[in-house]
Amino acid sequence: MLMIATIALVLASASSPASGQAVTPQSDGQGLRALAACREIATAQERLICYDREAAAIEQAIASGDLVALDREEVSKTKRSLFGFSLPAVRLFSGRKDRPDAEQEQVDRIDSVIKSARQLPRGRWLIVLEDGATWTQIDDRKLAIYPRAGHKIQIRSAALGSFLANVNGQTAIRVRRTN
């Protein structure tokens, strides 16, 4: 599977340890850059030693959970599951800087199926989607057909960080992600 160019470094990747020293994690991909720097070594024996050392450091970082690599499909799936939450700017989800915006997937709507729905006080709705995401109606608009399990729902981004949901093709209601 193709590995995404932006590799998520959750805490840190490993650096080049001197022989006999423990691998110490560094932030911002330093371990991957150190592995790539091994290509610059002229002699085959020293280059192989460098590759072995850096590969071992990366392997240790992966085993300890300090280094996590995601493919595009996993990143896309994660973006969709987090749709509706306000997240801090994380490089994992921002894509590569050298790619045009058109090539970077932006999730601005999701289509799903309602798993369950219940009416809250004042006639508002709490809707749970198949993936477990919970959305709560925040306006007072009434729905002609009450949402039920199995109904299709489309939730899209709206102005000023808000979201609109169309339940079974009806007029949109304003919603907020609550879980």
Image (cartoon, rainbow, N blue to C red):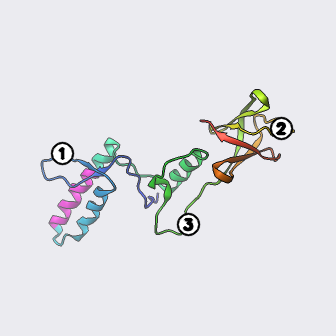
Q: Which residue is mark 3?
A: 101
Residue drawn at point x = 30 percent, y = 47 percent: 61
View extreme (right): residue: 144
Q: Are marks 1 and 3 in contact (CB under 8 Å)?
A: no
Q: Is residue 179 left or right of residue 38?
A: right
Question: Of label 1 and label 3, which has the lower sequence position?
Answer: 1
Question: Of label 2 and label 3, which has the lower sequence position?
Answer: 3
Numbered badge on residue 22:
1
Numbered badge on residue 142:
2
View extreme (front): residue: 160
Instruction: Kindly report the secondary structure that dominates the magenta region of the rendered protein.
Output: helix
The quadrant in which residue 139 appears is top right
Question: Of label 2 and label 1, which has the lower sequence position?
Answer: 1
Residue type pointed to by label 2: Lys
Residue 57 is a magenta residue: yes
The CA span between labels 1 and 3 is: 41 Å
Q: Which residues are magenta?
A: 45-58
Residue 143 is a magenta residue: no
Residue drawn at point x = 43 percent, y = 61 percent: 5
Given this view, does label 1 or label 3 mark the residue nearer the observer? 3
**How many other residues sit within 10 Å of disc 3, few (<14), some (14-19) or many (≥20)?**
few
* Element at label 3: helix
Q: Is residue 114 left or right of residue 66?
A: right
Point out residue 24 in the picture as x, y percentages from the top left corner.
23, 47
